[in-house]
Image: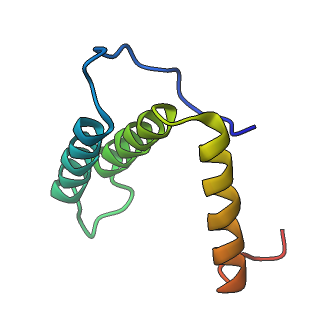
């Protein structure tokens, strides 16, 4: 089964996948705003982690079986494209 890295957030029952998609865009914008050529950039990394959490929240709104199938299809597609190493 798909494993999440963050605890589930408290959500309003009216919070929809569409609203969460808007949150993902917002977090992405915040991450880009912190972009610089001066690594390490903790502010950028923190916003990247917020984006990751927002994505997890989106997938938590889906059925677990569906998320697992998406993961399998994505892994297959990326394997076919040669994106993964030997590990």
Where residue 45 appears, as percent x and y from the top left, is: 38, 49
Toward which corner of the image does residue 55 lie, by quadrant? Answer: top left
Taking the view exactly as shown, the residue that stands out farthest to the right is: 86
User: Which residue occupies 23% across, 65% down?
Assistant: 36
Give the residue at x 36% y 39%: 50
Q: x, y (%) of residue 60?
A: 50, 32
Front one among 73 and 55: 73
Q: Relative to 58, is 71 above or below?
A: below
- Residue positioned 49% across, 20% down in the render: 8
Q: Is residue 53 left or right of residue 6?
A: left
* Count of numbered labels shown in the rendering: 0
Point out the image quarter for the N terminus. Answer: top right
Residue 67 screen position, x and y as percent: 60, 45
Q: Please give left or right for residue 81 compared with residue 33 in the image.
A: right
- Colour setting: rainbow
Is 79 situated above or below 45?
Answer: below
Quadrant of the frame with the C terminus: bottom right
* Extreme residue in the bottom direction: 81
Q: Quadrant of residue 54?
A: top left
**Residue 35 sits in quarter:** bottom left
Q: Which residue is at a point 26% across and 41% down the rendered structure image?
A: 18
Query: In the rendering, at what x and y percent does residue 25 appear?
Result: 22, 51
Comparing 9 with 61, the one in front is 61
């Amino acid at each position: 089964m798909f494993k999440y890295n963050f605890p589930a957030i408290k959500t309003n029952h009216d919070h929809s996948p569409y609203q969460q998609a808007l949150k993902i865009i917002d977090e992405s914008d915040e991450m880009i705003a912190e972009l610089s050529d001066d690594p390490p950039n903790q502010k950028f990394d923190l916003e990247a982690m917020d984006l990751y959490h927002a994505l997890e929240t989106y997938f938590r709104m889906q059925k677990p079986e569906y998320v697992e199938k998406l993961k399998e299809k994505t892994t297959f597609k990326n394997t076919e494209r040669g994106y993964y190493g030997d590990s």
